[in-house]
Image (cartoon, grey):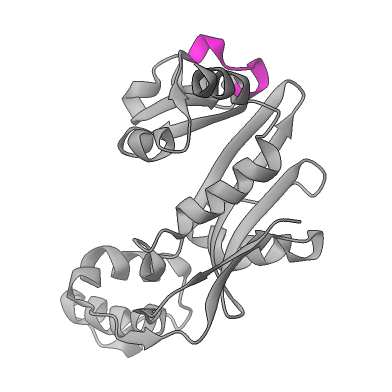
Amino acid sequence: MWRCCIPIIASYADPEPFSEDQTLLTLYTLAGEESGGFVTFRPHFFIQIGKALFSQGIIASPVQIIGAVDVRELTSAELARAERELWTHYHQQTADRVNDRLFAAFAGIKLIGVARCSRHPDGLEVDAVYVLDEYRRHGFARSVMILLIEECGRKETLYMHSKIELVDFYGSLGFLPMTESDLPKTIRDRFGFCMGNLKGIDVCPMKRDPTALTTEQNT
């Protein structure tokens, strides 16, 4: 199994410990109520409200990372970690233990980024590419994608639904925009709710064809 290590000097601490108590206190104040007047449970959406309202005022403290960032494929036993530690922040994704392969970046023992390649009956789909906010802009998404392409896309075409603002990023990895009608049916049907209007949700279908790339390199 191919893997790589990426040296890094510093990143940012996870601001999550701040959000719950401070957010609730602020919400109580805005509502003109004392905290004792509210029920005592703390649903997850309060944290999300806090992030939306107050994240601009939170400055994460820099943290020194000792060693290197390791990029490798997750074992089947580790798939639950991606669900619990990363995808809980990203549409509550879950992994298919039979058809999914996940590639991830670790800072020490901390899981910081992931990308998935799913095998459908008629093709391979890349999705759920996610890096924790405080570790972004260090090239970790690119490193995870390079490993995924090396392991899954050397001989097979990879398909994806890219956000419009990420088309150039995936283009730099060999993906090209394509028409939605040319997507494999099972992959196309995942976005059937859009009724053919992917632009309406800022999504662009893309594919990476290794045969076409090889031909282009040899010309």
Q: Is residue 62 above or below residue 98?
A: below
Q: At which x and y percent is residue 218?
A: 54, 20
Q: Residue at x 32, y 65 (%)?
A: 49
Closer to us: 37 or 80: 80
Quadrant where the N terminus sits is bottom right
Q: Residue at x 59, y 27 (%)?
A: 190
Q: At which x and y percent is residue 214?
A: 58, 23
Report whether residue 40 is seen: yes
Q: At which x and y percent is residue 60?
A: 29, 80
**Residue lying furthest top:** 181
Query: Left of 54 or right of it: where is 4?
Result: right
Residue 186 included in the magenta stretch of the image: yes
Q: Is residue 49 above or below residue 7?
A: above
Query: Left of 25 or right of it: where is 184?
Result: right
Residue 50 included in the magenta stretch of the image: no
Q: Is residue 46 above or below residue 125?
A: below
Report whether residue 90 is seen: no
Looking at the rendering, which quadrant does residue 20 occupy? Answer: bottom left
Closer to us: 12 or 191: 12
> How many numbered marks have been drawn onto this rendered protein structure?
0
Magenta segment: 180-187
Query: Left of 147 or right of it: where is 135?
Result: left
Magenta-drawn stretch, dominant element (helix, strand or loop): helix
Q: Is residue 1 above or below residue 190?
A: below
Q: Residue at x 82, y 44 (%)?
A: 98
Q: At which x and y percent is residue 133?
A: 38, 65
Closer to us: 87 or 74: 74
Closer to us: 159 or 97: 159
